[in-house]
Image (cartoon, grey):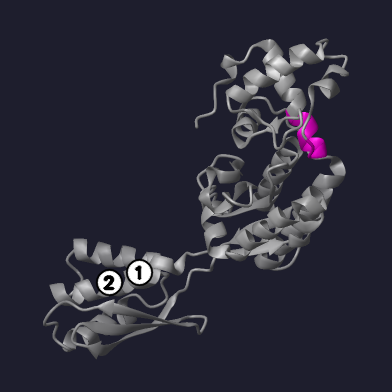
């Protein structure tokens, strides 16, 4: 269901809706018409408020979790609030200082781990960060035949790491092609990252300087592609998961489901990766992402950049949909800006 436009709500409906969302995010409890009528700012009777609440429920923005008269925002309602009504609260001086202190000193992974821990503590959520995987540089490559149709491509990196990939061989590939492909990579591409090696190969082919026949050239390209396919996969660091089970006992089942979502780091990393192209914070609310359809989790994430200005990772938090978005969104955004400035 698509969220209705903010313009579809009149002034009275907007005011009532905002009060309900603000109260729910602060307390976690459904809000009733009698409670709202006691707010002098509304100036409405309980009956008038109930009529407005009914209209908002029909639009899919509110729901009653049980038979009481109280209402709370749906995920659709939270999306409307976040996109069009939320008034952001800038991090305090103490919060900014804590984030900046976490980003000082040590290796990049240490900095990211500390900063994520700080963000977790300040937001009372679990902190998340995608750590960019260092690009391996080629030291030596070999191709070991396994069968007429397959070979094992073995890459030794300049850091001593060894990675193996099974690749398919074209039909009737002469055995000498495996030796020629390895010799070409070791002679012409040693010391380069996988991306740079592939770029040099393309350039030499374009200038007809790659003394390779079609079969051998295809083998070199396939070998580089096999390693590059997951060579840029980032590592996910999670800090402060204990915050997720610190709520009311009624929320424990949902918290357990949320912890299960976090344990599936590969899936969660894919969600965070969706924020790489965002200009600022990206907010995922509940079942908008299938990973959180059961736990009702929300993720707030923002990309951070390296010295050359390219996006290298994503930092953020995960928690229940009942988050203080107005406070946490600027906090995550400031953390990403700090990392971009200091690492």
**The one of 204 and 132 positioned closer to us in this rendering:** 132
Residue at the spot 73% in from the left edge and 61% down from the top edge: 241
**The one of 36 and 9 positioned closer to us in this rendering:** 36
Q: Is residue 240 above or below residue 21?
A: below
Q: Viewed as shown, does residue 243 lie left or right of 131?
A: right
Residue 104 is situated, as x and y percent measured from the top left of the image, at 76, 59
Residue 14 is situated, as x and y percent measured from the top left of the image, at 68, 18
At mark 1, the secondary structure is helix
Residue 222: assigned label:
2
Residue 130: assigned label:
none
Residue where numbered disc 1 is placed: 197
Residue 135 is situated, as x and y percent measured from the top left of the image, at 49, 69
Q: Viewed as shown, does residue 209 lie left or right of 314?
A: left
Picture quadrant where residue 279 is located: top right
Q: What's drawn in magenta, residue-wise?
A: 21-29
At mark 2, the secondary structure is helix
Answer yes or no: is residue 12 visible. Answer: yes
Q: Is residue 110 above or below residue 313?
A: below
Give the CA distance from mark 1 to mark 2.
12 Å
Q: Is residue 304 above or below residue 186?
A: above
Q: What is the residue that sits farthest to the left in this orientation? A: 172
Q: Is residue 243 magenta?
A: no
Picture quadrant where residue 204 is located: bottom left
Residue at the spot 27% in from the left edge and 70% down from the top edge: 221
């Amino acid at each position: 269901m698509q969220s209705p436009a903010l313009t579809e709500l009149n002034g009275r409906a907007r005011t009532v809706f905002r009060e309900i969302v603000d109260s729910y995010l602060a307390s976690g409890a459904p809000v009733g018409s009698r409670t709202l009528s006691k707010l002098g700012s509304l100036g409405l009777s309980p009956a008038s408020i109930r009529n407005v609440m009914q209209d908002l429920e029909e639009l899919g923005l509110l729901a009653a979790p049980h038979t009481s008269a109280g209402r709370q925002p749906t995920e659709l309602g939270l999306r409307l609030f976040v996109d069009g009504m939320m008034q952001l609260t800038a991090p305090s001086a103490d919060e900014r200082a804590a984030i900046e202190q976490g980003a000082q000193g040590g290796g990049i992974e240490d900095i990211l781990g500390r900063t994520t821990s700080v963000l977790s503590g300040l937001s009372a959520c679990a902190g998340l960060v995608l750590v960019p995987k260092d690009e391996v540089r080629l030291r030596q490559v070999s191709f070991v035949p396994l069968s007429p149709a397959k070979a094992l491509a073995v890459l030794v990196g300049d850091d001593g790491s060894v990675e193996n990939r099974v690749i398919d061989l074209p039909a009737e590939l002469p055995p000498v092609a495996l030796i020629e492909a390895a010799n070409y990579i070791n002679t012409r591409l040693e010391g380069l990252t996988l991306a740079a090696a592939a770029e040099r190969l393309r350039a030499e082919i374009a200038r007809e300087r790659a003394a390779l026949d079609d079969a051998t050239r295809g083998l070199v390209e396939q070998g580089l592609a096999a390693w590059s396919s997951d060579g840029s996969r980032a590592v996910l660091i999670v800090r402060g998961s204990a915050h997720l089970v610190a709520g009311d006992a009624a929320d424990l089942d949902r918290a357990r489901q949320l912890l299960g979502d976090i344990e599936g780091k590969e899936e969660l990393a894919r969600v965070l990766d969706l924020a790489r192209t965002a200009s600022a914070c990206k907010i995922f609310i509940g079942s908008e992402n299938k990973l959180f359809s059961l736990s009702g989790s929300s993720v707030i994430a923002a990309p951070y950049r390296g010295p050359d200005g390219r996006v290298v990772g994503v930092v953020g938090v995960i928690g229940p949909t009942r988050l203080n978005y107005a406070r946490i969104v600027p906090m995550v955004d400031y953390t990403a800006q700090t990392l971009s400035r200091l690492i």
